[in-house]
Structures are given as C-alpha cells and as structure tokens.
C-alpha cells in the first residue's frame, strides 16, 4: 500500500504517535501549556459535538466538544444546559488532557511482579477476562460470594457493583461516596427528617447562609457555586465556620475560627439559646416536629460560655451568629455539608444541623432547605435479589446491627477487619472500580495488608494510580469522553425560582482510543465466565442507556436531536408536605444505644509538640484523580502546608521552605512540600490539600509531587452510628533538613 500523508494528516498522526510515548519525552510538565499543533489556532475546520457529560468530578456538568480532524481540542459547557450552562471549571476544561494523557491505561495488563511492586505485562482481553472470571469464581467456590470485596466509585461502577452485589451475592461493597464522604450526612438527616438532604439549599434566595467546613471556591461544583454566588450577590449574610481562612471564609460576614472537632458544641449552644429565648419558629415546631421536650432538656446545659470554652471562640461571636440566623429565619440556608467524615463524632453534628434547620423553620421555604425534584428515568441493572443476611458483617445477631445508621453497603472498616482476621469469614477476592482505596481510605498500611492477603485483585481504571499497583489484572476503561453511560437528571440550577428539570445521557465526544473497553462489556464478559450468562440484563452500554431513557419516553436519537439535553417543566418546590416530620429527639437512636438528642462528643487534643492535620480541596484538582493532568498540575504542582504565622516565626520557618511530616504514630511522609505561612489558620492545626504525593512511577507528571495526606492519616476513627470513617484525628510534626521540629502550642 502506498502511504500518502498530507501535511494535515502528518500533523495528526504525529500527535497521535506522541500519545504512546511517555509524557516526559514529549513535553515536560513545565511545557504543559504548549498547545499541540491541532490545538493551536489555525485554518482547520472545527466541528462541534454535543451530549458530553463531564466526569472530572462527580457533579457531572453537561458539556460539548470542539473537534479538529477528529481530535478533541476544547471542552465547553453545553449552552442548552439549565444546570452548569456554558460554564465549566478548570478541571472540566482540562478533561482533554486526561483523554490524551500519554500515561493512560491503554490495554489489559497482568502483574508478573509483586502486588504493590508490579511488573506489567501486556495481555489480550481474552486472557485478562479469563483470568478475572476464573480467579473470582475460585474465590466464590472456596469461600462463598461474601469472600469478594468491592471498592467502587463513579458513574460506571454501579453496573459492576450491582453484578457483584445482586448476582454474585456479596454484601461487601464499600463506596467512597458513602463511607469516606457523605454517607453520615444522608443517614443522619434521614433519621431526623426522613430524607437524605443532598446539597439542596436554596442559596440564591437565602438571607443568611451557614457553612460548616464547606469551602466553596475551593470545593467547586459549578451549579452549586452559581447558586452560592447568586445568594451572596442578592445580599445573603454569610457565616463560615472553619479553623482556616478558606475561600468561603474570605467572603464571609462572620468567620468563626473554630477549634477543630468541636462544631457540635457550637450548634448546641446556638439551639439552646434559640429555645431559651423563644427565638425559634414555634409554629413550625408545633406543626412538624416531635420530641421537643426531650430535646430542650437534652441541650439545656449548652450556654454560650460552655461552648466558647470548648470551641475556643468568643461567646459573643456564637451569640452574634445565633441572633443573625434568628433575625433572617426562615430564609436561611443551613448547608448540610458534603464531605462530613471528619472525626468519628459526625452523625451527631449532622443531626444537630438538621434540628437547627427545623428550629429556624427553614424547610421547604424560600432560602431554606428545598429539595429540587428530578425527573424519573429507568434504573436498569442486574436483577435485585435478597442477599443472605448472615453474610452481612454489619449484622450482630437477632435484628441488631453493629452500625444501625450505616449508609448502603458495608462499612469499610468491617470489611478490612474481616479480611485481616479471617473472621467471621475470609475475604480473598477484590474488585476495585473507579476508586483509589490507597489514597481515599485512611490507614494506608492496613489497606495494603488487606490487598496482600487476597487470592486475587482486579482493578478497572483509566489511569495508573497508587491503587492500581496492587492489582493482579489491571483493565483499561474508556474515558468519560469516549463512552455512553449513566443518565444525569437534575433541575434548573436556581431550582426554586425556575421550575425546570432535565434529562441528559452521557454520549461519546470522540471514538474510543487504544484497547480500552466500556463497563458493560467488561462486567458482562466476567459474568459469563463466572457462570451468570443467563442473568445478564443488557448486552451493550447503548442498550442500558436506551432502556433507562425509555421510562421517560426518550431515546438516544431523540436526545441527540435535542443537543444532548431534554428539558421538562417542573413543579413549585416550596411548601411543606403534610407528612413531613422532624424528629428532634429520636427514640430509635436511643434504643440502639446512642444519644437520641444531638450530643457533643469531644475529640482528643493534639499532644505537646504536634498540630492536628486537616485537609480539603483545591479548585484545580479532584482528589488524586487529576494529579497527572498536565494543565492542572501546572496550575498547582504541590500542596503547600498552611502554618500559622506566629507559630512559623517561633519555628523559624518561612514561605517556600521544604518540609516533610511525621505523625504521632511514627509514620513519615514519603515526600516533601512547601510551607505557606499565614495568619489564616489556627495554631493547633496545619492544613494541606488532599490527593497529592502519588507514589506510582507510571504517573510521569504527578509522581512525588506534594505530600499524600492519607499516608499520615493512620489513627482511624469510626463514627459509632454509621461505621463511616473519621479522618481528622491525626497529629503531625514537621521535618526540615532531616530534623524533626516540634510545633509550639
Ligand atoms: N475542586 C474540587 N471540588 C470538589 C472536589 C474536589 O476534589 N475538587 N470534591 C467534591 C467532593 S466529592 C466533596 S465531598 C466536596 C468536599 O468539600 P466540602 O464538603 O466543602 O469539604 P469539607 O471537608 O467540609 O471542607 C474542608 C474544609 O473544612 C475545614 N475544616 C477542617 N476541620 C474542620 C472542623 O473541625 N470544623 C469545621 N467547621 N471545618 C473544618 C478545612 O479547613 C477546609 O476548609 O468537594 C467537592 N468539590
Ligand atoms: N485523606 C482524605 N481522604 C479522602 C478525602 C479527603 O479529603 N482526604 N475525601 C473523601 C471524599 S469526599 C471522597 S468522595 C473520596 C473519593 O475517593 P475516590 O473516588 O477513590 O477518589 P478519586 O481520586 O476520584 O479516585 C477514583 C479513581 O477513579 C479513577 N477514574 C477516573 N475516571 C474513571 C473512569 O471513568 N472509570 C474508571 N474505572 N475509573 C476512573 C481515577 O483514576 C482514580 O483512580 O475520597 C475520600 N477520602
Ligand atoms: S464541577 Fe468541574 S470537574 Fe466537576 S463536573 Fe463540573 S466541570 Fe466537571
Ligand atoms: Mo466526596
């Protein structure tokens, strides 16, 4: 064949060839802003493709792509979107750098070295799937279905998770979004109001907004940020409770520089004052709340002075917050938070938030907590079967649960303990799908020990990560820009003002690259090999999406005609439903052996010479998953540690100094980061962004950049009601020039 290459074709194939080289040889991290020839402005025609849905984080903004010569050169918000609109964040923008990341997983790999120290061999899909099917079946045959643990997260993890849960029959599924993120919030609100709260606060119409921790501006979910900014533009007073001067604290009217771990005491004092001074919404409480008498008695000792001493803030400031909230009630957004797995006393704090919302009468009113109603689509997946309750690690005999308010799945710590002790049964097979348990779950060494004792570990990801190093078989999934998958439904971003809803389905903006395959293919092929061919619910991912859409009388063809988003008229979300009830005192919680009225449980203070390690988000990264993205890496290559300026002066530290860490249990950080000296943090805490410090050498941009907060989170707390993790109970000292430095009190 004669190989004719036009200049245009040459440029294209040159940039495609570049994809298979390690990034370091093509472009250094510093050069990351240099556009590829096709990205540079030129005379090439541009094509617009619609129907994309971002997955650079879990908010799933609707996007469109601009293409030249089949290559995606730019992502933008879908103008049809009533959610994010034309806006996307820095991470969303940088999605093309994930798509074309030379370090991406490209074909199935077999680890012919050790777990944790892999030596990868490229194998065929046939061989990889045979191995996964055979090895997982062997685990089931020998130990039962409960011998498999699943660590899923993300849009494509639901289908395989349901397969292992419903068809194979293991209850041992632990989703990061529940056990390390928001599960506590959901079950605490359900135990109080009967509903998981989402983040459905009507901030655009609020007269006051209360944020505990939630650091909007650093935590970025586009439509949520739009709602927050709209509220501030409309004059809402902002109260931010945070030990650190966060991006939200910087916009606040009142910044409460609270001692970490004491938020519940702060909330109890506010509520006690509202009750004592009769500043609460009496009509709302009489109509919708129960247990007021028990509640009133239960919180009666919480004076401002008592809380002030506990929280290390002025009593007058707590009063100022209480008066401000009361004066603006009921139009107040008491934000339920999102990442709430903080200290292992978090269920009680979330219950307190739900009760405070009730005292202010702030449910279903303008500016309050108002659920935006999303349209219904089909939930197509593996048929639901009743799991064997005796396999559930959370069962404690006769109708009793170890953690009665657990979110769906099995608490991570129960799975890990069973795996390590073999009691009540061994756990010897492991499926990791879209989660990075090494950097997501506290107790890294424990996680590694769990992987080490497995008979078989498989992992499905798009990038190499610190978790993929523990796989025996590593499978490459097509990225979110190359696939169909779950349907995203929602409401207009300012949902309480404009009653519109939407249905969107993720559609590919480009064809799949390399040998990557989608989640339906991978799951089905493993199911066939485990003897479940007859139970397969759909043959392809397109069929999965079509069946779900059908319930809403839609199809992919119709959605494509509508630029990827179908818009429906919604309903007025205001007005308290007749059956709404708030349990200020919950006797079931008490019967289960926990406080039935929100109660403050204190956490241990830092030992002498140590500060508490706290963490959060940066606007340009999503956990660890975006760290190898060259644009995002360039925007923030490491995670400077925030140290109080007076403390830093005593320690003779200055901005930019290189430091490492040692925690109170003797664990050292593998890498170093830089110091950020600031008055914007308390003296008893240091702060760093989560997700940095990747150890996987295959990440040519991210490896070794910054410090991995998780490597220092070794003192593990478990929330007693839910079994979810608390991760802010660790204390650190700094290491500079090989010397361990005490942090003065
Ligand atoms: N850019 C970006 N945005 C994201 C994400 C991302 O990875 N990147 N992830 C998304 C996800 S999944 C989630 S769950 C959310 C998480 O985001 P949030 O729910 O906002 O997370 P938090 O842990 O509540 O907030 C971290 C803040 O809590 C403060 N803090 C630490 N200890 C305490 C304490 O004891 N009391 C109080 N009041 N504050 C404390 C920290 O100083 C920090 O400012 O962000 C979402 N948005
Ligand atoms: N120390 C500490 N721990 C935390 C947090 C913290 O702030 N500090 N935050 C907690 C919170 S709020 C959350 S939500 C969790 C998040 O925990 P994770 O979901 O584990 O975090 P990610 O870094 O997003 O990692 C997910 C993995 O999914 C992969 N991935 C990305 N896209 C795809 C895809 O399309 N398909 C597949 N198969 N894989 C994909 C990424 O490469 C990555 O390996 O972490 C929790 N853990
Ligand atoms: S908030 Fe940013 S990263 Fe998350 S889905 Fe939207 S554009 Fe993507
Ligand atoms: Mo999260």
Image: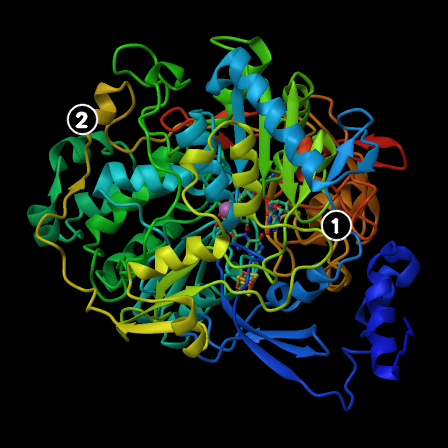
* Rendered residue at 42%/78% (across/down): 561
Please rate how many residues cluster around mark 1, counting C-alpha atoms within 10 Å: few if below 14, some from 14 to 19, many from 20: many
Q: Is residue 557 above or below residue 68?
A: above
Q: Judge from the rendering whether residue 171 lies leftward or rightward of residue 455; answer left or right.
A: left
Q: Judge from the rendering whether residue 3 lies leftward or rightward of residue 64; answer left or right.
A: right
Residue 188 place in picture, x, y as percent: 31, 37
Q: Judge from the rendering whether residue 503 lies leftward or rightward of residue 497; answer left or right.
A: right
Q: Judge from the rendering whether residue 433 lies leftward or rightward of residue 44; answer left or right.
A: left
| Residue that numbered label 1 is attached to | 106
Quarter occupied by the C terminus:
top right
| Residue that numbered label 2 is attached to | 587
Residue 582 place in picture, x, y as percent: 17, 43
* Rendered residue at 7%/49% (across/down): 287
> Mark 2 vs mark 1: which is more N-terminal?
1
Q: Is residue 10 above or below residue 670?
A: below
Image quarter for residue 464? Answer: top right
Tell me the distance, in whole angstroms, between the alpha carbons under discs 2 and 1: 54 Å
Q: Which is nearer the eye, 366 or 743?
A: 366
Image quarter for residue 433? Answer: top right
Residue 397 place in picture, x, y as percent: 31, 10
Asked if residue 727 shows in the view, the reply is: no
**How many marks can you see?**
2
* Rendered residue at 71%/29% (across/down): 472
Q: Helix, strand or loop at disc 2? A: helix
Q: Which is nearer the eye, 693 or 253?
A: 693
* Rendered residue at 59%/52% (across/down): 617
Q: Which is nearer the eye, 225 or 379?
A: 379
Image quarter for residue 553? Answer: bottom left
Quarter occupied by the N terminus:
bottom right
Residue placed furthest toward the front: 1
């Amino acid at each position: 064949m004669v190989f004719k290459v036009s200049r245009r074709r040459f440029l294209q194939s040159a940039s495609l060839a570049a994809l298979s080289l390690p990034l370091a040889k093509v472009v250094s991290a510093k050069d990351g802003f240099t556009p590829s020839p096709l990205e540079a402005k030129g005379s090439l025609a541009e094509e617009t493709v619609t129907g994309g849905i971002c997955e650079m984080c879990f908010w799933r903004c609707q996007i469109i792509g601009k293409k030249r010569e089949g290559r995606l050169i730019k992502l933008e918000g879908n103008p049809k979107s009533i959610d994010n609109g034309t806006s996307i964040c820095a991470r969303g923008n940088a999605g093309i750098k994930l798509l074309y990341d030379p370090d991406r997983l490209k074909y199935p790999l077999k680890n012919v070295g050790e777990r944790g120290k892999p030596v990868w061999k490229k194998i065929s899909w046939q061989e990889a799937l045979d191995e996964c099917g055979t090895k997982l079946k062997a685990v089931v045959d020998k130990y039962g279905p409960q011998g498999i643990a699943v660590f899923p997260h993300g849009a494509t993890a639901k289908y395989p998770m349901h397969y292992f849960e419903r068809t194979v029959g293991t209850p041992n599924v632990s989703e990061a979004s529940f056990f390390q993120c928001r599960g506590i919030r959901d079950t605490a609100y359900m135990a109080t109001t009967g509903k998981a709260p989402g983040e459905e606060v009507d901030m655009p119409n609020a007269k006051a907004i209360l944020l505990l921790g939630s650091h909007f501006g650093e935590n970025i979910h586009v439509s949520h940020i739009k709602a927050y900014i709209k509220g501030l533009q409309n004059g809402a007073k902002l109260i931010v409770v945070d030990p650190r001067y966060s991006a939200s604290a910087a916009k606040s009217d009142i910044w409460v520089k609270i001692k970490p771990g004491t938020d519940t005491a702060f909330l109890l004092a506010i509520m006690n004052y509202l009750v004592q001074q009769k500043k609460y919404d009496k009509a709302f409480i009489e109509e919708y709340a129960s247990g007021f008498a028990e509640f009133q008695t239960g919180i009666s000792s919480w004076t401002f002075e008592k809380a002030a001493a506990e929280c290390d803030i002025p009593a007058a400031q707590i009063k100022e917050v209480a008066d401000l909230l009361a004066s603006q009630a009921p139009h107040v957004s008491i934000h339920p938070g999102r990442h709430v797995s903080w200290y292992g006393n978090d269920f009680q704090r979330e219950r307190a938030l739900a009760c405070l919302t009730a005292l202010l009468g702030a449910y279903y009113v303008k500016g309050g907590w108002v659920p935006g109603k999303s349209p219904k689509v089909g939930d197509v997946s593996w048929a639901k079967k009743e799991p064997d309750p005796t396999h559930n690690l959370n069962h404690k005999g006769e109708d009793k649960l170890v953690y009665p308010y657990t979110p769906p799945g099995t608490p991570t710590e129960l799975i890990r303990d069973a795996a390590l002790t073999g009691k009540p049964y061994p756990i010897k097979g492991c499926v990791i799908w879209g989660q990075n348990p090494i950097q997501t779950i506290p107790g890294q060494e424990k996680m590694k020990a769990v992987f080490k004792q497995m008979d078989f570990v498989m992992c499905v990801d798009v990038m190499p990560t610190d978790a993929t190093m523990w796989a025996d078989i590593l499978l490459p999934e097509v990225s979110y820009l190359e696939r169909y998958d779950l349907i995203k439904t929602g409401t207009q971003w300012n949902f309480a003002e404009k009653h519109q809803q939407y249905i969107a389905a993720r559609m590919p903006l480009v064809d799949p690259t390399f040998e990557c395959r989608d989640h339906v293919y991978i799951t089905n092929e493993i199911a066939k090999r485990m003897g479940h061919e007859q139970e397969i619910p759909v043959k392809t991912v397109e069929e999965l999406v079509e069946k779900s859409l059908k319930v809403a009388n839609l199809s992919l063809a119709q959605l494509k005609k509508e630029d990827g988003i179908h818009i429906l008229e919604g309903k007025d979300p205001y007005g308290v439903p007749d059956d709404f009830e708030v349990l200020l005192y919950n006797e079931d919680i008490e019967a289960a052996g926990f406080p039935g009225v929100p109660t403050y449980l204190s956490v241990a203070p830092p030992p002498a010479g140590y500060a508490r390690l706290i963490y959060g988000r940066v606007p340009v990264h999503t956990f660890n998953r975006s760290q190898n993205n060259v644009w995002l890496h360039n925007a923030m290559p490491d995670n400077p540690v925030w140290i109080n300026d007076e403390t830093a002066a005593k320690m003779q530290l200055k901005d930019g100094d290189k430091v490492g860490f040692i925690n109170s249990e003797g664990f050292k950080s593998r890498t170093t980061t830089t110091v950020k000296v600031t008055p914007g943090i308390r003296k008893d805490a240091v702060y760093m962004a989560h997700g940095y410090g990747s150890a996987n050498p295959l990440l040519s941009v991210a490896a070794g950049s910054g410090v991995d907060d998780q490597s220092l989170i070794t003192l593990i707390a478990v929330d007693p009601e839910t079994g979810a993790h608390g991760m802010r109970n660790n204390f650190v000292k700094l290491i500079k020039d090989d010397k361990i430095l005490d942090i003065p009190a």
